[in-house]
Amino acid sequence: MDNKQIATFIKKRRKQLSLTQIELATLSNISTRKLSDIETANGATTIDILNKVCDILGVEIDLNIKSSNKLHD
Protein backbone atom coordinates (compact mmCIF):
# COMPACT_ATOMS: atom_id res chain seq x y z
CA MET A 1 0.00 0.00 0.00
CA ASP A 2 1.27 3.45 -0.80
CA ASN A 3 0.50 6.64 1.13
CA LYS A 4 -2.54 7.53 -0.98
CA GLN A 5 -4.05 4.07 -0.49
CA ILE A 6 -3.46 4.22 3.26
CA ALA A 7 -5.01 7.69 3.39
CA THR A 8 -8.09 6.57 1.47
CA PHE A 9 -8.45 3.43 3.60
CA ILE A 10 -8.22 5.33 6.91
CA LYS A 11 -10.74 7.96 5.81
CA LYS A 12 -13.16 5.32 4.50
CA ARG A 13 -12.89 3.24 7.70
CA ARG A 14 -13.42 6.34 9.88
CA LYS A 15 -16.59 7.16 7.99
CA GLN A 16 -17.80 3.54 8.22
CA LEU A 17 -17.55 3.90 12.00
CA SER A 18 -19.39 7.24 11.86
CA LEU A 19 -16.50 9.08 13.47
CA THR A 20 -15.62 12.67 12.74
CA GLN A 21 -12.01 13.71 12.31
CA ILE A 22 -12.22 15.50 15.65
CA GLU A 23 -13.49 12.35 17.39
CA LEU A 24 -10.86 10.07 15.86
CA ALA A 25 -8.07 12.54 16.54
CA THR A 26 -9.15 12.89 20.16
CA LEU A 27 -9.42 9.12 20.64
CA SER A 28 -6.01 8.66 18.99
CA ASN A 29 -4.47 11.48 21.04
CA ILE A 30 -3.27 13.36 17.95
CA SER A 31 -4.20 16.74 16.51
CA THR A 32 -7.01 17.08 14.00
CA ARG A 33 -4.48 18.69 11.67
CA LYS A 34 -2.27 15.58 11.85
CA LEU A 35 -5.25 13.32 11.13
CA SER A 36 -6.22 15.52 8.19
CA ASP A 37 -2.66 15.24 6.86
CA ILE A 38 -2.82 11.45 7.21
CA GLU A 39 -6.17 11.25 5.39
CA THR A 40 -4.89 13.38 2.52
CA ALA A 41 -1.43 11.76 2.36
CA ASN A 42 0.02 15.20 3.00
CA GLY A 43 3.37 15.06 4.75
CA ALA A 44 4.99 12.30 6.75
CA THR A 45 3.84 10.52 9.86
CA THR A 46 5.28 7.90 12.15
CA ILE A 47 4.38 4.24 12.47
CA ASP A 48 3.50 4.95 16.11
CA ILE A 49 0.87 7.51 15.10
CA LEU A 50 -0.51 5.22 12.38
CA ASN A 51 -0.74 2.43 14.96
CA LYS A 52 -2.73 4.68 17.32
CA VAL A 53 -5.19 5.61 14.57
CA CYS A 54 -5.51 2.05 13.28
CA ASP A 55 -6.03 0.71 16.79
CA ILE A 56 -9.05 2.99 17.25
CA LEU A 57 -10.32 2.00 13.79
CA GLY A 58 -9.96 -1.69 14.64
CA VAL A 59 -7.47 -2.45 11.88
CA GLU A 60 -3.81 -3.50 11.81
CA ILE A 61 -0.88 -2.26 9.81
CA ASP A 62 1.01 -5.01 8.03
CA LEU A 63 4.42 -3.87 6.88
CA ASN A 64 6.34 -6.18 4.63
CA ILE A 65 9.89 -4.99 4.32
CA LYS A 66 11.86 -6.72 1.63
CA SER A 67 15.34 -6.21 0.33
CA SER A 68 16.33 -7.00 -3.21
CA ASN A 69 19.98 -7.15 -2.17
CA LYS A 70 21.49 -9.72 0.10
CA LEU A 71 23.29 -8.27 3.07
CA HIS A 72 26.84 -9.41 3.57
CA ASP A 73 28.80 -9.53 6.83
Image (cartoon, rainbow, N blue to C red):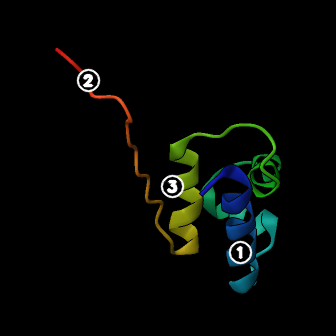
| Spot occupied by residue 60 in the image (x, y as percentages of width and height) | 46, 66
Residue, disc 3: 51
**Three-letter code, disc 2:** Leu
Quarter containing the N terminus: bottom right
Looking at the image, is mark 1 or mark 2 nearer the viewer? 2
Asked if residue 42 is positioned above or below residue 19 in the image, the reply reads above
Would you say 29 lies left or right of 20 here?
left
Question: How far apart are the alpha carbons under marks 3 and 2?
Answer: 29 Å
> Around disc 1, counting alpha carbons within 10 Å, would you say few (fewer than 14), some (14 to 19), or many (20 or more)?
many
Residue 36, quarter of picture = bottom right
| Spot occupied by residue 47 in the image (x, y as percentages of width and height) | 52, 44
Residue 67, quarter of picture = top left
Residue, disc 2: 71
| Mark earlier in primary sequence (1, 2) | 1
| Spot occupied by residue 54 in the image (x, y as percentages of width and height) | 55, 64
Residue 53, quarter of picture = bottom right
Question: How far apart are the alpha carbons under marks 1 and 2?
Answer: 40 Å
> Around disc 3, counting alpha carbons within 10 Å, would you say few (fewer than 14), some (14 to 19), or many (20 or more)?
some
**Three-letter code, disc 1:** Arg
State if disc 2 and disc 1 touch (CB < 8 Å).
Answer: no
Looking at the image, is mark 3 or mark 2 nearer the viewer? 2
Question: How far apart are the alpha carbons under marks 1 and 3?
Answer: 14 Å
- Name the one closer to the observer, 72 or 33: 72
> What residue is at 83 percent from the left and 47 percent from the top?
33
Mark 3 secondary-structure assignment: helix
Which numbered marker is on residue 14? Answer: 1
> What residue is at 48 percent from the left and 60 percent from the top?
61
| Mark earlier in primary sequence (1, 3) | 1
Residue lying at the far left in this picture: please name it.
73
Quarter containing the C terminus: top left
**Three-letter code, disc 3:** Asn
